[in-house]
Image (cartoon, rainbow, N blue to C red):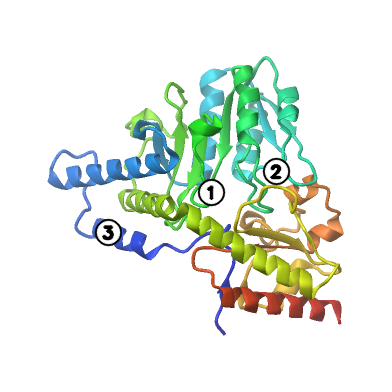
């Protein structure tokens, strides 16, 4: 039974070209990049080359890229780093949206437990945050606003440029979690006005365990890892050279193929959506259908069934009922709750996310499997 992988928002396979670039750094190039001998210098040069590649993808300066262990660490560094540096006595305030990934939500809650103020702004039924809601939430002691670039479950893209204008008019920094957008659509922090941007390698065909944080020049962060002062003093610890090399090459691939890949992903996504709606006519609804969405993401509500039970009938199909971070949890998705879905509709929601290696044949097979599973689960 050959599996069909349609869960690219959860993680991506490592691109073959990325694997090939990494291999020498798992064998002969094993030096510490802080060492001054030949092996160390080779690794240092590889790290800096990757920093340049990531910066080029984002159209920023290489000195503004800080390597981390992934999106979660990048988000933690952004939120805690700003709060602890700008308001060290827990006298500050943060604003986040109700549809944030736990990697933003939980650091914000942690800061709240220390005494920082926290306001959570909602979204509309499309899953889009209103910049005016952010403006209303900002206080005189607000030090940071964090709104994701695009939602990982329903794909809705947020008006970051407009939110940035609201923040900067009040001298407040804006962070955006762009783990789901970088490599899928254009993400240029300077054009959007974002001051800090998080990315995760395993969402863009690099390995798990590597990420980066864009930190606009002039912003000072309090480190959350203390040690020998690597990464410009923002992130201590000997650099993960093989994975940094991987991230750099993945960034180059994304830059090279961004536009054509986005068009193809949208075509595949729309093909699956249309076929499902034709097969289950008048009964399906698509979340964030009226919003600008990630080109690869389809969040669809199957009526009268439990999504987990339905998917259990098609083990060869690798899709999810929501974000991977919530997999196996009985708690309702905060995102689906925020857009106004009832608990019943939420439990019938399935997220399909296509990727570079998805084929039209897989889309056809996936549609047939989903329709059959839905009909069987309904007893039709």
Task: Pinpoint residue 4: horizontal percent, then vertical percent.
Answer: 57, 74
- Horizontal side of 313 relative to 74 (left or right) equals right
**From what the image shows, is residue 276 above or below residue 83?**
below
Establish if 3 lies above or below 180: below
- Element at badge 1? loop
Q: How crowded is mark 3: few (under 14 residues within 10 Å), some or many (20 or more)?
A: few
Q: Residue beneath label 2, please?
A: 99
Of labels 2 and 1, earlier in sequence is: 2
Element type at mark 2: loop
The quadrant holding residue 217 is: top left
Q: Nearer the viewer, residue 142 or 30?
A: 142
Residue at numbered disc 1: 185
Q: Which residue is drawn at 45% across and 58% down?
A: 205
Between 254 and 92, the one lying in front of the other is 254
Give the CA separation, mark 2 to mark 1: 20 Å
Q: Residue at x 53, y 44 (%)?
A: 72
**Compared to 11, does 186 lie above or below?**
above
Tell me the tag on residue 26: 3
Which quarter of the rendered picture does the N terminus lie within?
bottom right
- Separation of marks 2 and 3 at Cα, in angstroms: 38 Å
Residue 125 percent across, percent down from the top left: 80, 46
Mark closer to the observer (1, 3)? 1
Q: Nearer the viewer, mark 2 or mark 1?
A: 1
Disc 1/disc 3 C-alpha distance (Å): 31 Å
- Camera-nearest label, 2 or 3: 2
Measured as percent of width and height from the top left, residue 296 is found at 60, 58
Reading the chain from its start, which is encountered first: label 2 or label 3?
3
Q: On screen, 161 above or below 242?
A: above
């Amino acid at each position: 039974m050959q599996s069909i992988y349609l869960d690219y928002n959860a993680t991506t396979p490592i691109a073959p070209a990325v694997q090939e670039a990494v291999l020498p750094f798992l064998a002969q190039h094993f030096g510490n990049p802080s060492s001054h001998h030949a092996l160390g210098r080779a690794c240092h040069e590889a790290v800096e080359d990757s920093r340049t590649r990531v910066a080029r993808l984002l159209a920023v300066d290489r000195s503004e890229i800080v390597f981390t262990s992934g999106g979660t660490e990048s988000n933690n560094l952004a939120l805690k780093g700003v709060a602890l540096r700008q308001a060290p006595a827990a006298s500050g305030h943060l604003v986040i949206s109700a549809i944030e990934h736990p990697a933003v939500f939980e650091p914000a809650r942690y800061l709240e437990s220390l005494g920082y103020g926290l306001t959570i702004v909602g979204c509309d039924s499309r899953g889009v945050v209103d910049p005016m809601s952010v403006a209303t939430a900002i206080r005189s002691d607000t030090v940071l606003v964090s709104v994701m670039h695009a939602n990982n479950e329903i794909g809705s893209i947020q008006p970051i440029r407009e939110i940035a204008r609201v923040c900067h008019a009040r001298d407040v920094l804006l962070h955006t979690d762009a783990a789901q957008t970088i490599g899928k659509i254009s993400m240029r922090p300077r054009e959007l006005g974002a001051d800090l941007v998080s990315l995760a390698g395993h969402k863009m065909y690099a390995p798990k365990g590597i990420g980066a944080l864009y930190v606009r020049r002039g912003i000072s962060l309090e480190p959350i890892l203390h040690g020998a002062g690597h990464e410009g003093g923002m992130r201590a610890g000997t650099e993960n050279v093989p994975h940094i090399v991987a991230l750099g090459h993945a960034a180059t691939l994304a830059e090279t193929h961004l536009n054509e890949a986005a068009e193809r992903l949208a075509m595949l996504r729309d093909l699956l959506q249309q076929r499902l709606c034709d097969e289950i006519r008048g009964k399906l609804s698509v979340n964030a259908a009226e919003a600008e969405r990630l080109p690869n993401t389809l969040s669809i509500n199957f009526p009268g069934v439990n999504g987990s039970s339905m998917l259990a009938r098609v083990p060869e199909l690798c899709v999810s009922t929501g974000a991977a971070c919530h997999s196996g949890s009985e708690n309702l998705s905060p995102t689906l709750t925020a857009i106004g879905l009832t608990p019943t509709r939420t439990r019938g929601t399935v997220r399909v996310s296509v990727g570079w290696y998805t084929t039209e044949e897989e889309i056809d097979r996936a549609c047939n499997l989903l329709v059959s599973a839905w009909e069987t689960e309904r007893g039709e």
